[in-house]
Image (tube, coloured by chain):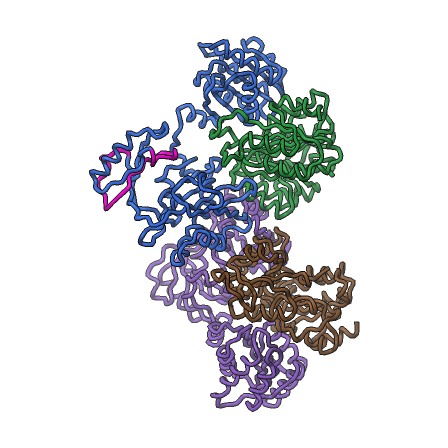
Chain colours: A blue, B purple, C green, D brown
Amino acid sequence: MKLFEYYAKGILARHGIPVPEGFVVSSPDQIRSVRGPVMVKAQVLMGGRGKAGGIRPADSVEDARKAASAILDLNISGYIAKEVLVERRLDVAKELYLGMTIDRSRKCLLMMASASGGMDIESVPEGEILMLPIDPLIGYQDYIGRKVVGFLGVAKERAAHVEDICRRLCELVLREDAELAEINPLVITKDGRVVAGDAKITIDSDALFRHREYDSLKEDLTPLEEKAKRLDIAFVQLDGNIGVIANGAGLTMATLDSLNTYGGKAGVFLDLGGTDDPEKVKNAMLLMHEANPKVILLNIFGGITKCDTVAKGVLEAIEGQRAKIPIVARIKGVNEEIARTMLKDAGLIPASGLSEAAELASKESARVV
Amino acid sequence: MKLFEYYAKGILARHGIPVPEGFVVSSPDQIRSVRGPVMVKAQVLMGGRGKAGGIRPADSVEDARKAASAILDLNISGYIAKEVLVERRLDVAKELYLGMTIDRSRKCLLMMASASGGMDIESVPEGEILMLPIDPLIGYQDYIGRKVVGFLGVAKERAAHVEDICRRLCELVLREDAELAEINPLVITKDGRVVAGDAKITIDSDALFRHREYDSLKEDLTPLEEKAKRLDIAFVQLDGNIGVIANGAGLTMATLDSLNTYGGKAGVFLDLGGTDDPEKVKNAMLLMHEANPKVILLNIFGGITKCDTVAKGVLEAIEGQRAKIPIVARIKGVNEEIARTMLKDAGLIPASGLSEAAELASKESARVV
Amino acid sequence: MPVIVDEKTKLIVQGITGYQGNYHSKAMREFGTDVVAGVTPGKGGQKVNAIPVFDFVAEAVEATGANTSCIFVPAPACKDAALEAIDAGVKTVVIITEHLPVLDAIHIVAVARGRGVTVIGPNCPGVASPGKAKVGILPTKIFRKGDVGVVSKSGTLTYEIVNAITESRMGQSTCVGIGGDRVSGTSFVEVLALFEKDRQTKRIVLVGEIGGTAEEEAAEYIKKNVSKPMVAYIAGRTAPPGKRMGHAGAIIARGRGTAESKVKALEAAGARVAKLPTEVPTLLEEL
Amino acid sequence: MPVIVDEKTKLIVQGITGYQGNYHSKAMREFGTDVVAGVTPGKGGQKVNAIPVFDFVAEAVEATGANTSCIFVPAPACKDAALEAIDAGVKTVVIITEHLPVLDAIHIVAVARGRGVTVIGPNCPGVASPGKAKVGILPTKIFRKGDVGVVSKSGTLTYEIVNAITESRMGQSTCVGIGGDRVSGTSFVEVLALFEKDRQTKRIVLVGEIGGTAEEEAAEYIKKNVSKPMVAYIAGRTAPPGKRMGHAGAIIARGRGTAESKVKALEAAGARVAKLPTEVPTLLEEL
């Protein structure tokens, strides 16, 4: 779960990492007073908001209201900010990068630092990034912070402060179940303070059960994505016209790959996951209908998800549909015979293997168009 | 560093473990009001205060003042309480024991629990104590608490509460650097609450550098022990009349053992530890003089502690002394020749080996008496 | 040299009184696995499918000499269950549970390494060695004893490929589903090392997915250490970059983690790479 | 089979720029130890006794191939130093530092176990193998090459006994001071196992103290695993119970931890137990 900048900065502050003073508004007239020079910043989750005009300076209440008004009208890579952050402008001497993420290969947390702050870390040459794996059994220790400070060439008088931020960032990641936490830029101001200029935090959505405080937060999702999330279904909208439902991310992707071989193009990726609840299958089918594909390709290899469960859900879902979308169904695995019997008269197009299913769905989609 | 009950309970409360409401006073007239039945408890670090009359019930302010007054006059195994804790009396249904200590063999923390609470855990049969080592890499996990609850036979409706206390006790030990933390008894009240009836916490004195909050606390030390502590010297008063100074606990104990062979009895155990500071040696010698032994036996095997450093400190210390106590000196190791030359004319009784030194000191002590 | 499970596997099922634990403890026993105990806190003394249930793993290990555990408990209780199993001296832990917080996975895996314990998963279908034992949820019917070692990040896609192998009248030595989460106890490399040593395994199939660099690391390893012929399939060749496809986070960074990068690395390491899962048996036959 | 140090020891001294680190890096080099680097944060680039100083252990390991570290840093920085050494891949860590918080010791020792690293100490004099290497602060002059393996909880008492052995014209194979803190990286048992395997060691001296049960555990081990003749000495026979004597916490519980209990256990295991340190050489000669 990606957090907006202002929320991420709130978390930094709670963990003792300095952030600029500021406040959030959702309309310009909520800006009542502004002390000294400020920045007005669009609260969107997409990168590149600066270039899109989503970050503007202001020196008075009027200025700030104007900036907020302009920003709230902006379309930033398809997203429109609902809120702006008004915060004290920093007198920047130097911009650093400090971040933490998961190191999949080493199976641990990774601290990253670079003296090239302020730009996308992906575009910084690898040689300019320090990557320090944090052994989970050792945990954060002072030598980690010392290495960061040494690599960044932080001046002696600020070394302790930057080391302290490293330690706190690591604590934050562990306490908040963050899978990503970036301070970019970490600003050294002209008067020698060290302040988080921007903050990106992604909370591990699998860990939300122990962080109920995020329940009330909303993500930037389309209505269908919102529904999918509530149903705990992996749902991705794509460019084609075939709606693919399968169980398991790997199988769903393999289904996409197979479609591609036969010229078919997926318009929806819907991974049911492992479920044995016909209700969930039904809701997934209804969601698929809402996405309005020309053909639905159902590819199930039953294990945890039993074939008859899927059949039951599918039957319930198509029962109430007025516009009948062609459904190519390939159902294999646990209880496949029962499922086949159940679906016999439902008007589905049966397929015996993955290739055959992909071929049928591709042909069908070409025909329908 | 052992903490008084009221202080230990303050720490429990800070970590979310329930304790009875109460307050501490150092004189009876500080008791202004008492809500309901209370206990008045001597704040001493010695065990057995209950049997000595150091814990008394009271039901009114007058009662409580009388109890406090009686307790503050008591001599409890040589210690006189300077403060009493007045706290709400618990309606006890059951007394359990819950504690944590260091498991030296397994090199980890050990959680201990027993259904025989309220008595000294040393006197509880081992079969009635659950001992759960906590793997430092694993840390406290829920199954530890479940095992405690299962072993104690805690009723289902209180299980979560007791498990919670186990978890908090473990956190407390880690955060506070406690080398011992005991809740004895852990009281189940008749109305079903779980409350710490008494608390013993010992903070690892080696970890006090990161717990400055304990600096202001005073330990129950004799004036000489107080001085020794300030000097970072291991100092123990014993029954004999020979003051033993050596460097290293093992060597000091071996010196005591050697004395014993020749009929000598140590009156002071003073371990200089490893030092290369003549001032510390001087202060140790002065402290030894204050303890007033008949003979001093100085046994140094120089390494970190160099022999000439010891010689320098000894010379400075004996210079100003009016009553000359005989000093048997055995000095060996790094720079022993220099030390020997320095001490040649100081009137010390030289010995070449440990046995000889012990023999000389024993004879001298017999002679002096 | 067994590959994770064999006839000596003595299995505990953690979460045996739940629906999945109950169902699969039976299925595993039918496959031939020696399921010796179940564990569910508070349900000690019960029986499930005639298997005795204990409150604690340590009790179950003491009573039965179990050496392996299969975990079906829900994600919030999973870390506790896995660490309890490791602490109780179990040598192999297979975690079926999905949606395990990544920090919990990191902790479990680190402790397991320190204790010399093998962890498979989380979010994996488990391990099956036809004729010997199955630990996990892989469907029994699709297997046939043979000489193909299968290692896969995926769940149902593994079934698809195992099934295709069986339908082509070949069989499997052992099939290991390592799980597709960001942090897994066992990676391709460790399983490849076991297959290389395993005498029954003559050919190896690797099933990967876009995202992460585990396939690239496997390719590095194969180049240097694997002498047996290999077929690979990478799911997600046609997935658009930047979209997160279920558990296979397609956070594709610096050119690594893409299907192209993986296919290229595996081909360079000498593996035949199938374009579709259904091609795997054909390529196997051609080896 | 070396006992912790030998000619192949390549040593880093952590805290080399401090008084003790400086002094003993020289003394260790004079003993014959290959002291390849020093580490003090912020002092990288300097030299101490012609030994190059680095900011980080990892740098020192990379530059010199060091495999062992000796730690002289003050207690508050000691955990960081030890974990840094382990993280950098050092295989043996000797911690001289005293007054290390016990929870820090527990953490260091647990991580070391998980990583397969040997920790000696904390609060120990170190290890010396005459003619090979010395890591620690044991006085050089008292040693003489020989066949007696010495393992001791104590510091200066070890010197006393080693010196007595040397003065009686015997010598030491290796002397290991394991330290007397409540939690030590290496216990008697591990060192006894090394002595048992070490061909140079023909006889073993064990020096214990009251408090704890490490000597009783050693006796159990000796009974089953040690074939070489042994002499032991337990300091504190005449210490009054209940008093805490310096680092040797005489928290004597349930009859274990007393001098009597230890002496009895060791004698039952076949060791000759000296009443006084000065008796040790005599008993050694009588073996």
Q: Is residue D77 left or right of residue C193?
A: left
Is residue A282 visible to us here?
A: no
Q: Assign the magenta stretch its main secondary structure.
A: loop
Say which quarter of the image contains residue B306. bottom right
Image vertical order of residue A23 relative to residue A270, above or below: below
Residue D145 percent location from the top left of the image = 72, 71
Identify the residue shown where x is 32% and y is 46%. Answer: A20
| D134 up-or-down from A57: above or below | below
Q: Residue at x 65, y 24 (%)?
A: C280
Q: Is residue D248 left or right of residue B74?
A: right
Give residue D279's position: percent from left, percent from top: 72, 76
Q: Quadrant of the N terminus of chain D?
A: bottom right
The residue that appears at 54% across and 19% down in the rendered structure is A260
Which quadrant of the view contains residue D237? bottom right
In depth, the one of A344 and B261 nearer the eye is A344
Residue A360 colored in magenta in the image: no
Residue B159 locus on image (x, y percent): 52, 44
Picture layout, residue A329 above or below residue D144: above
Residue A32 in magenta stretch = yes
Q: Residue C106 location, x and y as percent?
A: 55, 42
Residue appearing at x 66%, y 37% in the figure? C223
Magenta-drawn segment: A26-51
Q: Quadrant where the C terminus of chain D lies? A: bottom right
